[in-house]
Image (cartoon, helix red, strand yellow):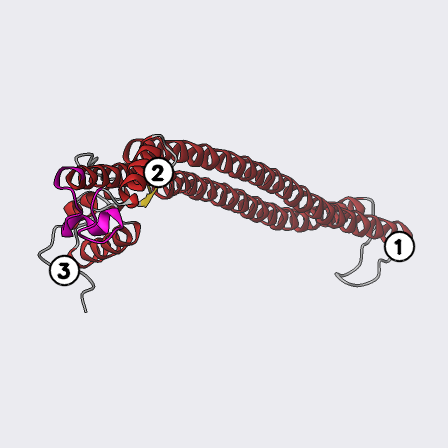
Amino acid sequence: MAGYRKDFDYSDAIAATQDAGKRQQLLAERQNKIDAEGLAGKVASNDAVSTWNGAYRPYSVSSTKSGGHAVSRLYDAAETARLRRFEAARERIRQQLSGQLSAIETDYTAGMRQTDINARQSAVSNAEKLAALGLNMGAAQAAATSGAAESSRIALDNRYRSDLNALGQARLSARAAAQSAAADREAALEGDYYAASESAALQQAQAQLTQFNADRDYSLSVAGLTGFLNGTPTLAWREYQSNISGDTQARAYEQALARWKNTGYVLQQDAAVLGVPAGTPTVDASYKNASLALQRWKAGYGY
């Protein structure tokens, strides 16, 4: 079931009726029609039509719902962009760290290689010096044939081990420094991001409150002009309608009383208005009572 009348002018019907329940029903059916036939943006919104009254028919009005959503969309877009910048900056820090660690390992490997070369060159040079002095280092991996040769070999070995240890310590220190610097940069980046997000959230709440107040004030001003707030009659409008209804009844009563006076009796058509049986003569006490009631009504006391 469609839930609306296809060939029916809901806008005119809404503007013409003062019945709150009927207006709400017509607005609901009109929204069904807009949704079903894809008319959103092509016709006046229900926010606007709900304020229509007689000839007053604005095509659009400010809406707390739409205004608040617009504010949220702006801040959501800004937050998404801020998050992307944060993630990109954090990824750059991690990539830089990876590059630094890779360079440290490359330098360490090159240092190890050079240390091995230096150790071999020192051993050859030392052996040549000892040979020139008539001292024999002995065969490779074998014990030296003299105390001086043994001391020389131990010194070379200690220096080699010391060089390797220094390389290892330098490698560990460089890695620790790079990782610590990257962690500090990432922590600072996160702190800035969350501080900015908290500030933006506060600004968003303030902007939404401002928007809400502005839309509320606008809706109240529209209600003052049309007599309707979101499709519901205002108290001022109901009082106005009540006064119109009372004035209409007073005029009908006064006219019926005049016909009673002129004809000398109550006409059938006036019996219900006057509250007395048809045919009642003016000499009856009820005529005097009716005249007094009209005077009280005009004086604002009701009847």
Q: Residue at x 23, y 54 (%)?
A: 277
Distance between the Cα atoms at labels 2 and 3?
32 Å
Q: Residue at x 18, y 56 (%)?
A: 33
Q: Residue at x 76, y 61 (%)?
A: 139
Q: Residue 13: x, y in percent?
A: 17, 48
Foreground disc of the pair 2, 3: 2
- The residue that mark 3 highlights is 5
Front position in the image: 97 or 290 = 290
Task: Give the quadrant of residue 50.
Answer: top left
Q: Residue 74: x, y in percent?
A: 39, 38
Q: Is residue 276 magenta?
A: yes
Examine the rendering and report whether any part of residue 195 can be seen. yes
Residue 70 left/right relative to 267:
right
At label 1, the amino acid type is Ser
At label 3, the amino acid type is Arg
- The residue that mark 2 highlights is 239
Asked if labels 2 and 1 touch by Cβ distance under 8 angstroms, the answer is no
Q: Residue at x 80, y 63 (%)?
A: 142
Task: Tell me which label, 2 or 3, sits earlier in the chain.
Answer: 3
Front position in the image: 147 or 118 = 118
Asked if labels 3 and 2 touch by Cβ distance under 8 angstroms, the answer is no
Residue 175: assigned label: none
Up-down relation of residue 217 to residue 2 (above or below) = above
Magenta extent? 261-282
At label 2, the amino acid type is Glu
Q: Label 3, secondary structure: give it.
A: loop
Q: Within 10 angstroms of label 1, few (less than 14), some, or many (20 or more) residues?
A: few
- The residue that mark 1 highlights is 146
Q: Residue 117: x, y in percent?
A: 65, 49
Q: Is residue 230 magenta?
A: no
Q: Label 2, secondary structure: give it.
A: helix
